[in-house]
Every structure is written in C-alpha cells, then in structure tokens.
Image (tube, rainbow, N blue to C red):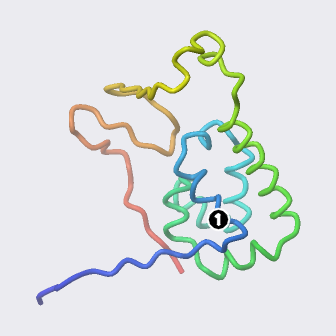
Amino acid sequence: MYVFNRITVNPQLPKRIGKLSEIANNLWWSWNTEFLRLFQSIDRDLWEQSEKNPVKFLKHVSQESLEKAIDNISFLKEYDKVVADFEGYMNSKNTWFANKHPENKNDLIAYFSAEYGLDQTMPIYSGGLRNPIRRPFKISK
C-alpha cells in the first residue's frame, strides 16, 4: 500500500484558554505546579498517559474536554491566576540580570548545555542515543 501523505489534526484551544499553549511551550511550567494542575483538571487520565507533559497533552486532548473546561468557573479562575503569574514573570523588570547589567538590557542571551535535566517529563539525550527507558505514548479511548 502506498501512503501519499499524512494529516495531523490538533485540537483547537478555545480563545478563552489560549495561553495554555504559550505557557506549555515555555519552560516556566517546569517549576510551576499550579499550571500543571490545570491539565490534570481538564483530563486526569490523559494527563497521566501523556506522562505529565503539557505539550504532549495539548496534542491529544479532546475538543470536548477543552470546551468543558471553559464552562468550569473554578478552572477559569485558576487559569486566570496562572496566566497573571506567567505574564508577571515574563514582564518582570526587577531581575538579577537587569539589576547587575542594566547596560545590556537589550542583549539576546542563549544558554546551551550538552546535557542537563529540566523536568522528569522531558527525556535527556546523550551522545545521540535515545533513552531506552521511555515508553511509546498510547491513547486509549
């Protein structure tokens, strides 16, 4: 059989909770447990199946679960608090670097490391070898 092409369908985040994707793709979440609890409250089983990885979770969450989340007042209250914390962190002017090196405030800085752990949900690759302990991700319906 010849496969011409593949189509990947990702759930569309409702506008009301659209920051979930931005925060999931920022390492800020790796030390913010309030943010991670939002995913658990959307779909506890999928959160466990996705190995508590917010990026993986957002690729597999059902549209129905997302729609239910925006109807949940307590979820939205917690979401709004997390977004405010994230934006406060991202827009903070009172940082160690800003205080110690104000003349370099517009410099772009990149950090590189051959290997270090950020979070248990993110596999570490060493010497180009894949971590053999990782299991394939399976979605059960």
Q: Compare residues 7 and 56 and report the one nearer the observer.
A: 7
- Answer with left or right where residue 102 lies relative to residue 7: right
Q: Which residue is mark 1?
A: 18
Kindly indicate the quadrant of the structure image that contains residue 58: bottom right
Residue 66 in picture, x, y percent from top left:
67, 74
Mark 1 surroundings within 10 Å by alpha-carbon count, few (fewer than 14), some (14 through 19), many (20 or more): few
The residue sitting at 68% across, 37% down in the picture is 91
- Answer with left or right where residue 109 lies relative to residue 66: left
The residue sitting at 48% across, 72% down in the picture is 139
Q: Compare residues 50 and 78 and report the one nearer the observer.
A: 78
Amino acid at pointer 1: Gly
The residue sitting at 65% across, 82% down in the picture is 64
The secondary structure type at the circle numbered 1 is loop
Kindly indicate the quadrant of the structure image that contains residue 33: top right
Residue 3 in picture, x, y percent from top left:
17, 85
- Answer with left or right where residue 126 lies relative to residue 61: left
Residue 54 in picture, x, y percent from top left:
56, 55
The residue sitting at 31% across, 37% down in the picture is 125
